[in-house]
Image (cartoon, coloured by chain):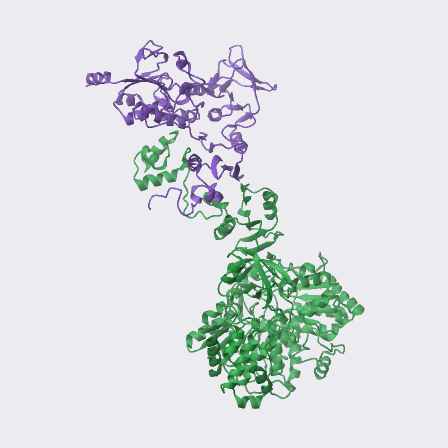
Chain colours: A green, B purple
Amino acid sequence: MVNRSTCAYCGVGCGIEIHTNSDGSTSVKGDFEHPANFGKLCSKGSSLAHTLTGEGRLLHPKINGLRASWEQATHYVASEFKRIIAEHGPGAVAFYVSGQLLTEDYYVANKLMKGFIGSANIDTNSRLCMSSAVAAYKRAFGEDSVPASYEDLEIADLIVLTGSNTAWCHPILFQRIKSAKAARPHMKVVVIDPRRTATCEIADLHLAIKPGTDVALFNGLLHYLQVSGKTDAQYIQQHCEGFEAAITSARQAGDIQQVAALCDLPATDVADFYQWFADTERTLTCFSQGINQSSQGTDKGNAIINCHLATGRVGKPGASPFSLTGQPNAMGGREVGGLANQLAAHMEFEPQDLKQVSEFWQAPNIARTPGLKAVDLFDAVADGTVKAVWVMGTNPAVSLPNAGKVVKALQQAELLVVSDCIETTDTSAYAQVLLPAAGWGEKDGTVTNSERCISRQKAALEPLGEARQDWRILTDVAAAMGFAEHFPYRTAADVFREHARLTGLNRNSHRKLDLGKLAVLSEQQYNELAPVQWPVLDKTGSPRLYGDGHFSTASGKARFVAVAYTGVSHPVSPDWPLALNTGRIRDQWHTMTRTALAPPLNAHKPEPFVEIHPETATEMGLEDQKLARIQSPWGSAILRINITDSLRPGELFVPMHWNDQWARGARIGELVNPAVDPISGQPESKHTPCRIEPWHPQWSAVMLSRDNLPIPDCDYAAKIRGKHFYRYELAGGDTVTSLPAQAQQFAGADEAASVLYQDPRQPALRGAWLDAEGLRTCIYIGPGNSGIIANADRNWLSGLFGKPELDAIERKALLSGKSPAGVEDCGRTVCACFGVGEKTILKAIREHQLTDAAAVGKHLKAGTNCGSCVSEIKGLLAAQ
Amino acid sequence: MRRHAVKTESSKPKLVFVGNGMAGTRTLEELLALTPDKYAISVIGEEHFGNYNRIMLSPVLAGEKTIENIMLNDDEWYRRNNVVFYKGEQAVAIDRVKRQVTTRNGKCIPYDRLVLATGSTPFRIPVPGNNLTNVLTFRDIDDVNNMLQLSRHKQHAAVIGGGLLGLEAANGLRKQGMDVTVVHAYDAILNRQLDKTASRLLQDTLEQKGIRFLMNAATDSIQGNTNNEVCGLKFKDGRQLVVDMVVMATGVQPNVALAKSSGLQCDRGILVNDVMQSFDPAIYAVGECVQHRGQLFGLVAPGYDQARVCANHLAEMGIARYTQKALATQLKITGIQAFSAGQFDHVPDSEEITFFDGQLGHYKKLVIKDNRLVGAVLYGDTQDGGWFFDLIQQQTDISPIRDQLIFGKDFCQWPEQATAPLPAAA
């Protein structure tokens, strides 16, 4: 059976086919008909089937750790929310939701919080992702509307990828660009990124910009466009406002030399970029977290958009400013109003909009003012203003900046409800109520990708255990709170139709979001809905917006925004001399709750690491592949050192993914400064001042086990799931008194190791547990600088799991940690005195044409001591 | 032809060997290899056999080999090498002034050089009843034949002594279908060759083969029946054991009776210098009968080393000196691998690297002192024993390979300059 759906991961929103095989197993393939990917999938998407396991799933509702029925849990959540609202007002409760939720889930959450609880305290992890882009679009176009389409990637003549490691974060779009460039060699790609990322593979020009100086670079560009006469005066005049102020401000950036100096770039490179931009009509500027995750992210977005407005390159084939969103349904969440500063359906907290929405929802108690944005929201939980928070499908304990403070806030919240498909996350650890949500593959609804394309995400599997659709969980709680008549949904389609109808109210406004045509879909039509880009004014949808120069503002004109470079919130200083950058890696997603379950995805970058330039590493006394402690004023982490010249000196890069479920001491969110963009509220996750020093463990260890063991509490730990095994990289700053006891504890074994190696001096211990099914666990512990730990052949050891039995050589080699490749089985011992085996003797006889026992003795010593085996050697000679 | 040979022989200096065991015969072989014609050689052998591999008596007892299998040199070999072989003759006196050896049969055999290779005599513990009928020792072919014969109609055997020989005897008798108890005066068998752990593993293995052990058992007396046949053992702590056969495997003593009676300087063994010469420069001694720099010898390896030196000196080359080396021992029981070498028990200022595979019953211990391997005990997997033994003897600094050392040569890579010999070009 084949179900068409969409991928769970990034904002590309690839179409997939879930094949359910006759044995119940599933496999995932790309959907050749989906306009985002035309059948292609990246490494993460290809491994989706690996994540469809029951492993780690939350299967039943739980209250205070005890299993509860849905009725009990729903009632508990509803009554606790009601009590807290009654005692402290609606501002004392909040929802923190996720770009992983489907539009239907989002819609019900938003309606419940804003419409019926009467608070706008609903924000989403999209805040961390593209809220700056949203704010920039709204300031420029009057609406959160992406003007471009993926096909622009193929028809543009210049693609500027700024703050976007497209190759790893939007791999399918990268592949599309790469193919287009191969087909149209004159197409140019400029990558603007402090790091030389994998994306630079296709770059004609890489600008390794100084972090945080993007506004200056694009202001410089705007200024250059104007002084070189490349602006489209007619377009500006007819379709835009505010150009004078913007150009006045941009002029402050100075000429190319000045821009190059400020951005720490070669002037010739800046000149090339400016000239290419000026000369190329079909220019597409794609931007992502490198722009958005900044205390000046909104201004950066507008600095980019200003350049496109000045050249009239908005919504035209191959020419637009194009925000690539991070999450699969960040856009869908924005459409329903999932951000605290939006109302619903792109409507705002304006009197007219409030009136329309409250009438549509029949919600007189509708929230009148924006709520708390993510960082502020958890600050409010920390200071007790917000008493109850319901976290849905996201992991703020890992992903928010200053995550240590977030953890404290979660710990002290009066009520923390977490609905998730995974039972144990760094966030759920503090929840009083756990609600099992359907996971990807079980969820049913719609998502909107980066190009405004709405696709069906369809269930191929029954929800595991008692898991339910998020919209249903919310609907039931809404009913239990007394709002049953306003939440009458029986199916996802019921929710979708209402959402579409609400967007239809925009038809008579300047706003573009309008799915009105979809409000009348039958269940079957909804199920079979083909991917379509909004606004859906007819059957074909809308590939591009604003190409006609008519924008979503009241005047219909786009707005230039005067922006000025201000620099980062917390610059480096003598005490904190390095700049910490964070981001994604190719094969992990967010906080790894799913991707870490897929063995193929853990092989690329198995451990949490810090990248550092060789010069800086030398300066700081760091060695490649050793461990380092990184500290910022907000927290610290211990990570594996990767020395690479792909970074600028003085800067560090750390992946955002690792957390307490797969590591210890590696939650980089703890270090990230809490500065946010004043307009979007998006944190400055790309720049935190910090310092780094070598961290010398007292001991280090590597353990592999077929069992899913808890991560030991030590200073550094990384757990890696492989095929048939889990690997644990461990290190501690403490002194271990008893290594055998420690090893046994790490291995979770009741009995001593089946095979044990001990060296008291080091002190070093290696142990293995074997049973009827083969190798169960092996562990290698040594002192901090132990070569055996670093050199243990992890690949070879990994391969031993899943074997029903180890052969004699493998078993002998096991605790050496080294592959016995090339070591020959010497066979049954013939000469006991010198330990010479039968096969060794036969080989020597063959290779050296030995004819008597004395010759064998001369070669191998065999038989030359006690002589007991001489007759046997003679027998072997005779047999040859 | 023969006459001519005899005539030629008579003009050569006369070399006489007393003893036809492993050390003596090896000396003869080494000498023949160096200088086949230098001496007119005679060998006086007390046993009624040619030269055989005494170590292989255990497999013979176990029924895994025959006497024929373990013969090294038959009568033809002596003839071929022009060696006069007095088989079954016992040398009873040496006249050092006349330089001649007298045998029990009254033969007088003159010598210019004499090699004493009289070996050792099994030690019978001095308890009442130690000479009862069916109380045997385990030294030579006659002993083995006696045991094999008794095993056919006796059922309960006790082997006194849990050393190498005792265990091999016990295993052999068990293989012959007897009910065997090893009586050992200490708390661990092979306590001189193995450490406690290896000893325990070995005992477990042997117990699985059906051999019983009485540990810490000091024999008080051996009981006999009215026919003077052994019927039981009594121990100092009051324990008793009903048996109808006893094998004493409580060690050996150098056989120095002949040397002593001829006035040669002896302590526990015949005193020899570094070229295996006794205080009488015409008389050499090799093997288990000698005492060299205070040390006695019970293994074949030092006997062979001595043979090489002695032959070198007899050949008048005079470039070899005997130096004692660390010793490696192996237990010769089929299916059991046990090895030890060097110092391995409570060596001061040493570190012990251990490897233990409880399921396979493999155990290894390496004793490291000042970055040198000084001792090794291996049980179960003794394949690398020889290599460890080399490292011990060569005093190699093992610090670069310490982490992999115990896994054997194949797993150790020497950094840069290869200390280990390179394999022949492939």
- The residue at the far right in this view is A87
Q: Is residue A110 left or right of residue B83?
A: right
Residue nearest the observer in this picture, B131 or A612: A612
Residue A845 percent across, percent down from the top left: 32, 39
Residue A177 vs residue B424, the one in the foreground: B424
Residue drawn 43% across the image and 46% down it? B413
Q: Is residue A566 above or below residue A626?
A: below
Judge by depth and name the residue closer to the eye, B93 or A4: B93
Residue at image position (42%, 74%) is A182
| Above-or-below relation of A439 to A330 | above
Which percent across, then down, holds residue B426?
33, 46
The answer to whether one can see residue A143 in this image is no
Direction from residue A240 to residue B84 in the image, left or right: left
Q: Position of residue B166 (x, y in %)?
A: 48, 24
Q: Quadrant of residue A405?
A: bottom right
Image quadrant containing the N terminus of chain B: top left
Q: How many marks?
A: 0
Can see residue B30?
yes
Which residue reaches farthest top?
A: B106
Above or below for B272 versus A574 = above
Q: Quadrant of residue A184?
A: bottom left
Residue B384 x %, y %: 44, 38
